[in-house]
Structure formats: structure tokens, C-alpha cells
Amino acid sequence: MTQSKFEQYGGFAVVSRIVLDFYNRLLDDDLLGPFFEDVDLPRIVDHQTKFLAMLLGGPAHYTDEQISRLHRHLDIRGEHYDRMTALLAETLRDHNFAEPDLNEVIAQFEARRGLMVGMAP
Amino acid sequence: MTIEAINAQLLRAIGVGVVLIDIESRRTFFENDTFAEWFGASEGGRPLADAFPDLDPAAMLKDLQSGKRHDIEATFRVRRRSMTVAVTFSLATETDRQIVVAVCQNITRIKELEAMIDSYSLMVERNTREIRREKERVEQLLLNIMPRSAYDEFKSLGIVSPRRYDPVTVLSLDFSDFSRTVLENDASVVVSELNDIYSAFDRIGEQFGCERIKTLGNAYIAVSGMGDTSANHASAAASAAVRFLRYLRRRNETHPIRWKCRVALSTGMVVGSVVGVRKYIYDVFGPAVDEAERLMSFARPETIVANEPFAEAFGERQGLRRIGVMDVGGGRSMAVFEVSEPEAVAAEADL
């Protein structure tokens, strides 16, 4: 059986550091930070843990329908998504992700753009 | 630089928040730099309630006066971040006035890690549940194609080695006029009816320890005595056979297709094994299976026939009627019996 990136990069022990790092970058970012302004800590951490576990092939699975439902109330625009993509790539690069793996993760993230961008009523 | 100056400098710059509180006025009179960074600087101190809104001063004083420390956790927001500090209050004794020292440790990272572990544990638990469900489905599927004993072997060793079972009783059943039934009825109706009937046979067989091995179109083959070496495999198979006939009769009263079957019971040796590498089929073969096939030609619709070893295992009962002799190959022949239903039911007392 082929290893997922989640396992390949050290499982939860390593991914947890990436999650916290990514979470800090998000909160510091003036474009994306406001999305998390009124969300309490456990929820943001839960969100980021599942988000990264999903992208890296860890133990989180979301259907397209779930992703779209979870983001429907947010006014996510193209520039937000671009920034999120850039932050994710930056974080993974800083955690020594090999470029092909990084591109694969980013491609996976990009594939879900339509589920989150422009969904707000 | 004097020791006092170094201490003062250290107290200001240390990574934990330190606050000194005057008990009488219930105000802070010293806040170090770390505390000021978290809560904002205050000139000349601030009321205790402003510095620690979550603190119950009476409870704190009660703890301190009884010689204990008082601990609280405070969560607040610094810009977009949730920050949690653990505050320990203790009484300073070597001063001319009573003061309380509050030491604040930033435990935000611990809280974040706790939240992450919670989130991850829930994910893993859910996955484990899904895997368990999947495993049960696979187990059910495999138990449909092989007996439990073979499945247990397959589970622990990854293979099922061929095994000899001697003696067991093979129950072979087929439907009379099957081709006509198929021609005269809609294919999906026939399949659905067969599915119903075979499922009922499975349930009946299970009651009597008679395990289905396979179905092949209109043929249903089960074996009794494979699970545990039962001395009563013949009686068990006979009981199941009678129930099969009765079930069909009762079913025919309310269904348009009238199913009629005949049954052959053959006692003897079989070999059970998984055949195939990628597409597993558990099968039995051997003399008892061959003889069951040959016996079938002696059976009329709605009757049960059996071979000689069955008659021996079943016992000398009035209900066995000799109806002929069959050739079993190699120049040998064997008596064939018909089993009466009441006799088979009476034999259940032995089970």
C-alpha cells in the first residue's frame, strides 16, 4: 500500500507542527485573519487540523458537499483563495516539503476552489 | 549593577507575567513588561477586577489565608488570537505589608495542542469505527462463501488448507421442472424468489448446523458435520431437509410459482478447500458429493433419498425404506433409501 503524504512526512507528530505554524500565519495575515476573528481557538485548530489532514491524505475525509456547506456562509473571494494557496505553499516549503509533493498538495487544494469561492448568498 | 537592580531587571523582562497586588486596596502596584504586553500597560496599577476579571477575590483570599496557593485560568483575545494564561496567586510573607504575587504563564500553546489532539483523536476514532464496520462487512462476505472454521483459518494464516471431513452428510437439493419455471416466468422474479428461498434454507440450515456450501442455479448444496464433528450429522441433515420441504409447501400456498424440490442425503467423506487465488470459492468435493449427485436420480419431487452410510449413521429406523441400488463406480454398488418425514423429525430427539 502506498504511503500518504501524511504518513510520509511523519504523521501527526510532524503534521501537528505544520498545522500550528499554518494557523499562526493565517491569524497574522490581514486578508485571511478576519475570517477567524470571532471563531474560538478549538474550532480554528480543529478546522486546520482536518484541513491539512485531508490535503495530506490523513484520517480526514470531506465530501465536496460537506466542504461547500461548511463554507457557504463565508464571503470567500478569489483573492482570499490565492492568498490561502500562497500561505499553504510557504508553510509546507518551510517544513521541507519536496517540491513535487508540495505541488501535488496545492493542486488538490486548487481543485476545491469552486466549492468555497463565491458561495456566499 | 547591584543584585537588586539585576533582580528588578530580571523580573521585568522574564517571559512570565508577574504582578504584585496590594491586598488592602485590592489594586496592582507592580506589573512586569510581559504582563503589560498581554494586558496593556497601566500607570500606577489598576483595580484587581480589571487585571483579572475572572478572579473571585474572596475565594483567593480564603485559599491564601489557609496557606494554599490559588490558581485560575484566564482566556482573552490579543488581536485575533485567543490567549490563555494560567495564573498562580501566592502570599508574600517577607514584607511589612501583605501583598499577593500573581505569576502568569502563557499556556496558549498547550491549549492549542490540546484542541489539536482532541480534533485528531475524534478523526482517528471515527476512522477506526469505519474500518471496524468495513471489516465486519468483509467478514460477512467471506462467511457467505466459506464455513466459519475455514474463515478463522483464513483470517489468522491468510490461507485455507484443504481439509478432510469424514464422516459428514452432504445435503443436495434441486428443483423439479426448473427450466420450465425459468421459461415461464420473468427472470428477475425467478432470481428474487430463489434468493428468498435460499436465504430461508440458510436460516433453517443454520438451526441444524447444516452449512450451505454453494448454490449452482437450481441446486443448493449444504454439509452437516463440518463445523464440529457431530455424531448426529445425519439426523441434522435429515431435519434440515424435512424443514426445506415443509417451508416450500407452505410458501407455495401464497406464491404464484409453485416450487418443488427433491433432496439427496449422502453420508461419507468430503474435502473442503478454498479454490482460486483471486476469486475465492470455498468448495467441497469427494465421494459424498459425487454420491449425492447420483442419488438425485432416485428422488421424486418432494422426497428425500439417502445413501447407505447415511442409513447406518441415521440408525435402524422404520422410516428408512430401501428403494433401490445405485452403482458407485469400481464395480461397487450401494443401497438407496427414502427417508420419511415423520421419522426424520422423530430423530431430532438425538440432536
Image (cartoon, rainbow, N blue to C red):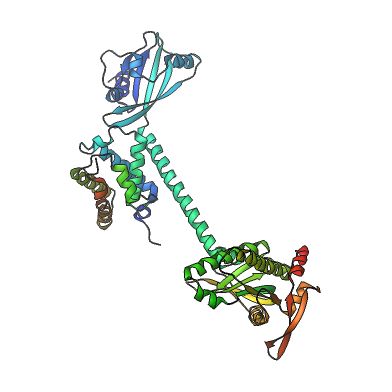
Quick one: B210 or B120, which is closer to the camera? Answer: B210
Residue at far bottom of view: B331
Q: In this view, does B167 lie above or below B61?
A: below
Q: Name the quadrant containing residue A5.
A: bottom left
At a point 73% along the width and 69% down the height, the residue shown is: B341
Q: Is residue B110 left or right of residue B288?
A: left
In-front residue for pair B10/B141 = B141
* Residue in the image at 46% along x and 16% along y: B59
Q: Name the image quarter holding the C terminus of chain B.
A: bottom right
| Front-most of residues A84 and A14 | A84
Q: Whole-percent x and y of residue B72?
A: 42, 23
Residue B39: give x, y in percent of width and height. 29, 23
| Residue B271 as seen in the image, left or right of residue B90 | right
Q: Quadrant of the N terminus of chain B?
A: top left
Q: Is residue B162 visible?
A: no
Q: Position of residue B50 (x, y in %)?
A: 33, 17
The answer to whether residue B278 is above or below residue B36 is below
Q: Residue furthest left?
A: A79
Could you tell me how many numbered marks the image carries? 0
Q: Position of residue B226 (x, y in %)?
A: 66, 69
Which image quarter: residue B2? top left
Q: In this view, does A58 lie above or below B330?
A: above
Answer left or right for A17 relative to B299. left
The quarter of the picture where residue B311 lies is bottom right
Q: In this view, does B279 lie above or below B58?
A: below
User: Could one spot residue B339 in this view of the protein?
Assistant: yes
